[in-house]
Amino acid sequence: MEKYKLDCRLFSGYKPCSPGKLCQDCRDYSPMGTRILIINLDALGDVLRTTAMLHPLKRKYPESHVTWLSSKGAVKLLENNHYIDRVLEYSSESAILLLTEKFDLVMSVDKSKVGGSLANLVDAKEKLGFGIAETGVIYPFNKEAEYLYEVGLNDRLKFKDNKKTEQELLCEAMVLEYKRDEYILNLTDKEKEFIERYKKEAGIKEGQAVIGFNTGCSNTYPYKKLSFDKQLLLLKKLSKIFPQDKILLLGGKEDTENNNLLKKKLQNKVISTPTEQGLRKGLLFVALCDIVLTGDTLGLHIAVALKKKIIAWFTISCVDEIDLYDRGVVITAEVDCRPCWKSECSVEPKCNDKVDVDQICEAVKRVHPKAVQKV
């Protein structure tokens, strides 16, 4: 077996790396180096934000092979990522595969019982992040992860005292150097070609600003999005203030009915982009925007990853955990009880109805390409 290089990142053990090539004569041997497993099964936005961790990870382990295990929906966000050698969708099959392998390092970044259980079982020299105790509860593997662990258990710390972003907290927990690194979301050449075709089909001219409005959010936290009446009012004002620009309605399949109704009421003042073509196609409509208006949702994280100008409103969630990388404006709901992370609330008026629409419009003016050109 010595003639086969089992630690080569190109070797599969199934067939030649290329037709006719013999392993023992190969000059393209590329040893894996440090074998790293990242377990990240959390929400889609959190998975995308975690990609910022790959920069310091590769600085610390330049010769390494990175396997990333994620949920079915999230793997689409990891496609074409130059720092990831293997993306696995979580399933019983992928779990069995990982339990037969050995790793130098496991990074379990979610406070998740499923992810933590698998992290417990995987054979690795070192484990960072979160696992499962013998009593069945989540606990931190290492002392560096204890602060992030405490943030999830202490409302005072999470809502008032903590000023670190999630990227900084994660780097600290994973014993990595934090340098405010960016998310990674790489488009393919075909995706870039699609964007250019869609611009022509939608009548978006060269030099014309595109304002994208992400109308929705996950059903888990409905107060992250503006109420329908608030959305309609905002769009009417935007179309009046920026008549020469294109305004795009963005969202997922759960926002289809909402966006269709907005389009019906506003007619040719807005463009309603397709909402049921899948995550990877959906993010391309964000990519063609100059400015994105959004709540603290997956749409926000996609816009951050694509380096867009962002106007973000915050209702129930924590502003300090989010980094817009100096490319955006933050607007908070005018209520004393935020943040709270509640999915249900009896308080009236609701926080998502206390977001100031005029503030959003003024913020768009400040980051608008024409305003930037004047500066």
Image (cartoon, rainbow, N blue to C red):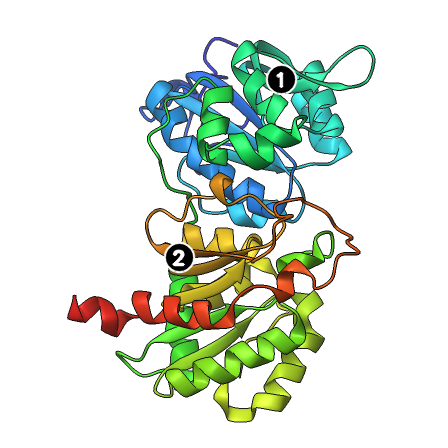
* Residue 128: quadrant of the picture: top right
Residue 246 lies, with reference to residue 107, above or below; the image says below
User: In whole angstroms, how far apart are the C-alphas of marks 2 and 1?
Assistant: 45 Å
Tell me the residue at 31%/83% (across/down). 205
Tell me the residue at 65%/82% (across/down). 260
**Circle 2 residues within 10 Å: few <14, some 14–19, many ≥20:** some
Image spot of residue 171 (x, y percent): 45, 25
Lateral position of residue 246 relative to residue 91, left or right: left
Image spot of residue 2 (x, y percent): 47, 8
Q: Residue furthest bottom?
A: 267
Image spot of residue 281 (x, y percent): 54, 64
Three-letter code for the amino acid on which mark 2 is drawn: Val
Q: Can the viewer see residue 39 in this picture? A: no
Lateral position of residue 34 relative to residue 123, left or right: left
Q: Residue furthest front?
A: 336
On residue 329, the disc is: 2
Q: Secondary structure at mark 2?
A: strand
Three-letter code for the amino acid on which mark 1 is drawn: Glu
Tell me the residue at 65%/48% (across/down). 337
Which tag, 2 or 1, sits closer to the chain's start?
1
Disc 2 or disc 1, which is closer to the eye?
A: 2
* Residue 52: quadrant of the picture: top left
Residue 133 lies, with reference to residue 183, above or below; the image says above
| Residue nearest the viewer, comparing 12 with 57 | 57
On residue 101, the disc is: 1
Lateral position of residue 310 relative to residue 14, left or right: left
Q: How many marks?
A: 2
